Amino acid sequence: MWLGLLGLLAGSLGVATGGAMAQSRDRLAEAIRAYQDVDFELAARLLRQELARLSASGSAPADRIRALMYLGAADLFRGRRDSTAFSFRRVVLLDPRYRPDRLIFPPEVTSAFERVRELTKTVAIVPPRDTVIAPGTDSLRVWLVASSDHTVDVTLRYADGGPFRSLYRGPIGDSLWVQWDGLDAAGAPPPVNRVLLRVASRTATGDLAGIVQVPLDLRLSRPDTLPWPPPPADSQFLPERANSGTARRALLGGVVLSSAVAALPALVGGTDASSGPRIAVAGTIGLAGLLGYVLHRPGRPLAANVRANQTLRDAWQRRVEAATAENARRRRDVRVVVRAGQATALQPRGP
C-alpha cells in the first residue's frame, strides 16, 4: 500500500513539475507573441512576471537571458530606456559572452545592447573542469572572457577571503588567459584544500565595477614510497673466523696417529731394537698435527668468507641507497588535483 502511495505521490509531483514547466513555456511564448504583435505593454507585463518566477526557481541563465532580452526590447519601444539598460545589464552580468541574434532583434535593440555591454565591466571565468598539475612546472590555465575592455585584478583567495596569491593585474580586451603554477606566495604547494579564484573588474577611474569568483578544490597527490629493503638473513652469512673444532681435530688426529706409530712393533727400522725411525715418523706426524692446529687455530680470520659477506652487505647497502633516492624523488613528485566549482558574482566591494 505504501509503495502505491509513494508511486502516486511521485507521479503527482512529476505531473506538477511538468505542468509548471509547460505553463512557463506557455507564458513566455505568450509574452513573445505579444512583443511580435507590437503589444509592448502586455509583453513587458508578462515578461516581468515570468522573470520573477524564473529567478525564484533558480532557473538556468539561458532562460532568464531570453526573457530579459525581450523585456529590454519591449521597454525600448515603450520609451523606457532606463529599464532597457537595466535589463540588458543583467544579461551582460549573467553571460559576458552573450550577443543578441540580429535575425531576431532589430538594429535599434542590438545597438542599445552593445552600448550597455560596452559600459558594463565584467568577465566570465572559464576554468577547466578537472586539472592535474605539477607545482612549479605545470600551470592551471583559466580563460577570462570580458564584456568589454577594462582592467582586472586576478587573485587567489583563501576560503575566508584572505589573500593567497596574486596572478594578474592589468588590462583585458576581448579575452585573457591567466595561469597559476600551483604554488603559494612562498613558493610551496598549497597548504589548504580550497582557494577562490577571484576576478575584480575596475572602471577607467579605478573604481570597483564587480567581482566574479570560482571556488577551486585542491588535493595534493603523491606516489606511494617504496618499502625499505630487508637486510640479509643471518643464514646468508658465512662464518668469518675459524672455530675450535677443526683445530682440535687436527691436533687430536696428530697425537693419536703419532702415538699409534710409536707403539707399533719395530717394523719400520727392520729390527726390534731400533726404534729411531718409528720415533721420527711419530714425531713428524705429531708435528703435522701441531701445524694443522696452528693453521686452523680458533678465531683465525677466514678471508674468503669475509669477502663474500662484505659483498652481500654492499649489495644490500646499494639497494637501501637506491630505495632512499627513489623515495626522495617520489616525495618531491607532488601533484595538485584541481576541481573548479560554479562561478558566482559578488556585490562591488574592496577585493
Image: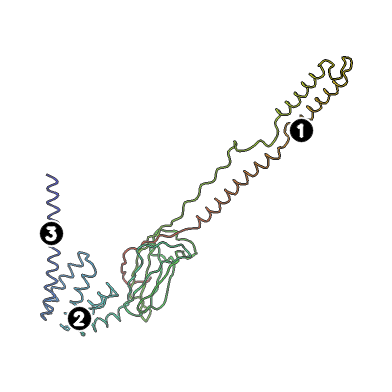
How many discs mark residues in the rendered view?
A: 3
x and y, in percent, of residue 304 in the image: 69, 40
Q: Is residue 330 left or right of residue 194?
A: right
Tell me if residue 307 comes above or below residue 76 in the rendering. above
For badge 3, the amino acid type reads Ala
- Look at 21% across and 66% down and name the residue there: 59
Q: Which residue matches tag 2? A: 103
- Provide the residue designation for mark 1: 295
Position of the N terminus by quadrant: top left
Q: Are marks 1 and 2 in contact (CB under 8 Å)?
A: no
309 shown above or below 159:
above
Image spot of residue 253 (x, y percent)? 75, 24
Mark 1: which amino acid? Leu
Residue extending farthest to the front is 270
Q: Which is nearer the N-term, disc 2 or disc 3?
A: 3
Can you tell which mark lies on residue 73? none
Cβ atoms at labels 2 and 3 below 8 Å apart? no
Amino acid beneath label 2 = Leu
Tag shown at residue 16:
3
- Quarter-of-image position of residue 80: bottom left
Between circles 1 and 3, the one closer to the viewer is 1
